[in-house]
Image (cartoon, grey):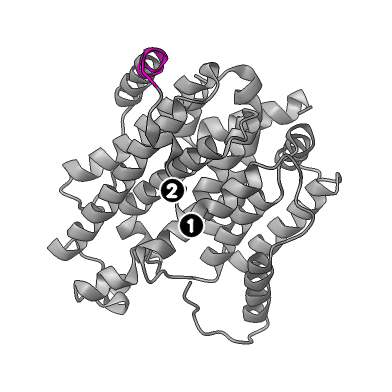
Amino acid sequence: MIQPGDLNHCRNAIRHGSLSFHAASKLLPAKVRDPALALYAFCRLADDEVDEGEYQTGAVLRLQERLDAAYAGRPKNAPEDRAFAAIVEDFEMPRALPEALLEGLAWDAAEHRYETLSGVRDYSARVAAAVGAMMCVLMRVRDPDALARACDLGVAMQLTNIARDVGEDARMGRIYLPLDWLAEARVDPVNFVREPLPTDAVRRMVKRLLAEADRLYRRSEAGINVLPMQARTGIWAARLIYAGIGRQVRRHGYDSISMRARTSGPQKLGWLMQSGLRCAGSVLMPQSAVVYARPLDEVAFLVDAASRARQDPGRSASVLQVLAELKARESGIGTDRPMA
C-alpha cells in the first residue's frame, strides 16, 4: 500500500502542477483516486524533468533507472518513486505501460519529429494513452474494448495539448504537427521554428488536429460508460475539461502561437457538473456498439499489454533502440536528428 506521507506529497504535487487533472480526480472514488494521484505525480515528474531540464538525455536515463528500481522492489528514496513501486505491486502493473511513457519521453529528448498524423499518434500513444491504460489497470479494468477507448481518450488529450502549444513548442525548437502537413502548406520547418507565425496555413493545421481529437473524444465516450460506475464521473470530467481546451483554441481562431488557450475555474466547475449528468445518463442509455471499434493501430500494443494481468519481464526492442540512440548522441556518435 502507498504510505500516507508519500500519498500526501503526490496530492500536493498534482494540486500545484496540474489543475485540470486535480479537478477531475476529485470525482473518482478514493480507491482509484489515491493511486491515480500517485501515478500521475510520478508521470508528471518524469515528464517535467525531460521537458524542462537542461540535460534531457540524462533525465530519460535516470527515469530508466527509476523504473528498473521500482520493478525490482527497490525504488529510489523519493515519495513519487515509493508510491509508484507500491502501485506496481498492488495492481500488477504491466511494465510495458510505463516503459511506453519512457519511450515517448526519449523521443522528446532525441528531438524526434513526425512525418505523418500516424507518427503523431504513435507519440501520443506513448506519452498519454499509456497513462490512460494505466488508469484502467488502477480501476481493475482489463477488458480490451474498454482499454481501446481509454487509449482513444489519451490520444485525443495529447492532440489537444499539441494544438494548444504549437507556438510555445516552436519557440523551443520543437514541432509536433505532421511534417507532411507542413509540406502540403509550404511551411518550411526551419523558418517556422525561427519565427512561428499564426498564418492561415498554420491555423488550418491546428483546426485539422483538433478535428482528429474530437473524433477520438467521441469514440472514447462509449468506453467511459463501461467503466465501474463510481469511476465514470471523474473520467467524464477529464474528457470534458480537456476538450474544453480545444474549444478555447477554436475561440481564438485556431491561433495557438500568439496566445495560449486557458480555461477558467468557473468553466471547470461547469464541466464537473456536466460530468455528473453524463454519468447519470449513462445508466439509462444502451451500450454503444462503438465500444467494440478496433483500437487505433498505434495503441494496439498498449491494449495487449494492459489486458494481461502480469508484468512483462523485459524491455521492448523499440525502447532499447531509442535508449541506445540517446546514449550514442550523448557520446557524440550519430548526432543527426532522427525522424520517427
**25 or 51: which is nearer to us?**
25
Q: Is residue 178 left or right of residue 6?
A: left
- The N terminus appears in which quarter of the rendering? top right
User: What amino acid does circle 1 point to?
Assistant: Glu
Residue 108 is situated, as x and y percent measured from the top left of the image, at 52, 64
Q: How many numbered discs, if any?
A: 2
User: What amino acid does circle 2 point to?
Assistant: Val
**287 or 328: which is nearer to us?**
287
Residue 227 is situated, as x and y percent measured from the top left of the image, at 52, 25
**49 or 245: which is nearer to us?**
245
Do tag 1 and tag 2 residues touch (Cβ < 8 Å)? yes
Q: Is residue 311 above or below residue 329?
A: above
First in sequence, mark 1 or 2: give its number.
2
Span highlighted in magenta in the image: 278-286
Q: Is residue 35 left or right of residue 109?
A: right
Report how far apart the C-alphas of labels 1 and 2 lie in the structure. 10 Å
Q: Is residue 243 above or below residue 304?
A: above
**241 or 181: which is nearer to us?**
181
